[in-house]
Amino acid sequence: MANGKMAITNWFQKKITDPLVSILHRGAEPNQLAFSAALGITLGVFPICGVTVFLCGMAIALLGSYCHAPTMMLTNFMATPIELSLIVPFLRFGEFMSGSLHHLSFLEHYT
């Protein structure tokens, strides 16, 4: 059992931790990392699923050296659960803003 945990730890260290640390040691400034992380999370909760990657790609292309692309994409992917959990509140807010009637969601059909 201990051998399996060591293999997972070594894999995580080799595939995730070491590349991330090497990216961060390449000269990214703290304010650049903070800006990129904030922008990645902000674009990551955009209410249309699947569009966030393209939005981050456009932001990286437009901002160039002002943002750190790996940090922005990492925080974009980390924001995916938040985006998915906000789908229903975004729908309800859209109904409120447009003054439309309450539409049944797919969850209400099963309850």
Image (cartoon, grey):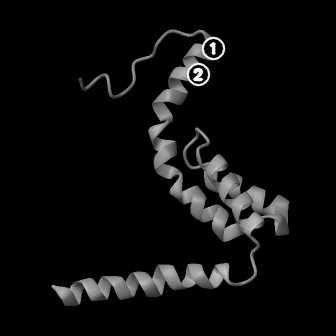
Q: Secondary structure at mark 1?
A: helix
| Quadrant placement of the N terminus | bottom left
**What's the residue at 46%, 87% (across, down)?**
14
* Location of residue 37 in the rendering, given as x and y in whole percent from the top left corner: 66, 59
Residue ID at (63%, 56%): 53
Q: Which mark is residue 94?
A: 2
Answer whether labels 1 and 2 touch (C-beta < 8 Å): yes
Dot 2: what SS? Answer: helix
Front-most of residues 105 and 20: 20
Q: Position of residue 72 (x, y in %)?
A: 66, 62
- Outermost residue, front side: 30
Q: Mark 2 Cα within 10 Å, few/some/many (few <14, many 20+)?
A: few
Circle 1: residue type: Ser
Mark 1–mark 2 distance (CA, rounded to whole Å) = 6 Å
The image quarter containing residue 48 is: top right
* Residue hosting label 1: 98
Tell me if 26 is positioned left or right of 19 in this view. Answer: right
Tell me if mark 1 has few (under 14), some (14-19) or many (20+) residues whose alpha carbon lies within 10 angstroms of its own: few
Above or below, 12 against 96 in this view is below
What residue do we see at 56% from left, 22% from top? 93
Residue 38 left/right relative to 11 = right
Residue reaching furthest to the left: 1
- Residue under the point 58% across and 38% down: 47
